[in-house]
Amino acid sequence: MNHFEYRNGEMFAEDVPVKRIAKEVGTPAYVYSLATLKRHFRVFDQAFAKIPHIVCFSVKANSNIALLRTFAKEGGGFDIVSGGELFRALKAGADPKKIVFSGVGKKKEEIEYALNSGILMFNVESEHEMVALNEIAGGIGKRAPISLRINPDVDPQTHPYLEVVGVDCHIGSQLTSVSPFVDALARVREYLDRVLVGSLLKEGARIRYLDLGGGLGISYKDEMPPHPEEYARAIIQGVEGLDVTLILEPGRVIVGNAGILLTEVLYLKETDEKKFVIVDGGMNDLIRPALYGSYQAIQPVMQNNGEKIVADIVGPICESGDFFAKDREIARPDRGDLLAVMSAGAYGFTMASNYNSHPKPPEILVDGDQYYVIRARENFDDLIRGEVIPAALQ
Ligand SMILES: *Cc1c(COP(=O)(O)O)cnc(C)c1O
């Protein structure tokens, strides 16, 4: 459920007409609904209310600090994959004791930063990483709390500066049924048994966290992903009898349908074979269709009952991959019409770039009948920040 809906044929974000946002901040622009964000977080969190758990929002899905602040205030933690994401989470007021650090390529400075910040645990993904983590922790006189990813059979016993506190997995993204999660959980339990009875744990150590990762899907088109309650029911059943705190790392399911990318139609180009709707947002703003061939619903901000056409909806970038939709049926738009690319709240802005030297779009957070600019539109000076023409070239 989300709070983007039509009233008398006009799209609203909560109680704000989307057209007004476009007029006041321009296009392209990301628009998020605070009510939707909170609702999604709460529904997910409450689904696990029966058991000890921490919902660690996956920062890479949407890293704007206003959103992170929202989840921190709801009691959420964060799943991070870089020092930059740790910085964002801390800026947003995150409790470091609710931060887990995932990712296959953690660098020394990032590990030190996380150790010094006192995060909950590192999800260790390889033997080499464990060696590095042990060295770095020893170097600053700390012990690193770690969680073991189920696939690599690594033995932390020879690493004195590591304390195994959890086991974890992350099986994929945009999953639309519960069975892969149930299977993964069974494997994690099996692994946990081996860790417990095997040689991996020191005397007195205890596995306290079971981290199931993220990956619950959303409906972009006609997918029917399980409701978080159904997902939670299956998982709660799967952890029965274990004395652990469950860690969940949802990203997309929380923010995906809580955001749209607002874009303006620049031109309609018609050839004999094909029609193109050229809009001012492009793959630089939202790369999912170009990168994954993924489907994004596209809706007019002002509904019209006019002629339907079938067209490619493309951006201004000089790349054949620059499209939001192919062969899409759409009410024939005019120059200046506004379109909303739906389900753009996850892996949208976080994957935006300045390709073709387009400034990144602003991010807008709607709250009831108000909205806030939570990231300003970039300008041309932002584009060249840090660039230098060496004296020799002057
Ligand atoms: C990307 C990622 C997530 C979030 O995945 P979603 O599909 O957005 O829920 C969670 N955990 C890890 C380790 C990830 O890499």
Image (cartoon, rainbow, N blue to C red):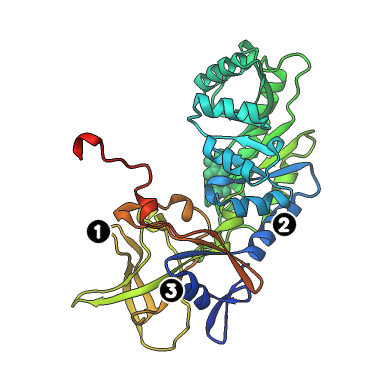
Q: In the rendered structure, which disc, 1 or 2, sits on the residue that comes first in sequence?
A: 2
Give SS at disc 1.
loop
| Residue 386 lies in quadrant | top left
- Location of the C terminus by quadrant is top left
Marks 1 and 2 close (CB-CB < 8 Å) = no
Residue 169, percent across and down? 59, 36
Residue at mark 1: C-beta within 8 A of ligand 1: no
- How dense is the environment of label 1, judged by Cα within 10 Å: few (below 14), some, or many (20 and up)? few
Visible residue check, residue 37 = yes
Residue at mark 2: C-beta within 8 A of ligand 1: no
Residue 33 versus residue 134 in the image, above or below? below
Residue 218, percent across and down? 56, 58
| Residue 90 lies in quadrant | top right
- Looking at the image, which residue is at 37% across and 76% down? 329
Q: Amino acid at mark 1?
A: Cys
- Looking at the image, which residue is at 33% across and 62% down? 323
Q: In the rendered structure, which disc, 3 or 1, sits on the residue that comes first in sequence?
A: 1
Marks 3 and 1 close (CB-CB < 8 Å) = no
Marks 2 and 3 close (CB-CB < 8 Å) = no
The reply, left or right, for residue 23 in relation to residue 238 is left
Q: CA distance from mark 3 to mark 1?
A: 21 Å
Residue 339 marker: 3
Residue nearer the viewer, 145 or 231:
145
Q: Which residue is mark 1?
A: 318
Q: Which residue is mark 2?
A: 42
Residue 34 versus residue 125 in the image, above or below? below
- Looking at the image, which residue is at 63% across and 26% down? 115
Q: CA distance from mark 1 to mark 2?
A: 42 Å
Q: Amino acid at mark 3?
A: Leu
Give SS at disc 2.
helix
Residue 340, percent across and down? 46, 71
The reply, left or right, for residue 104 in relation to residue 253 is left
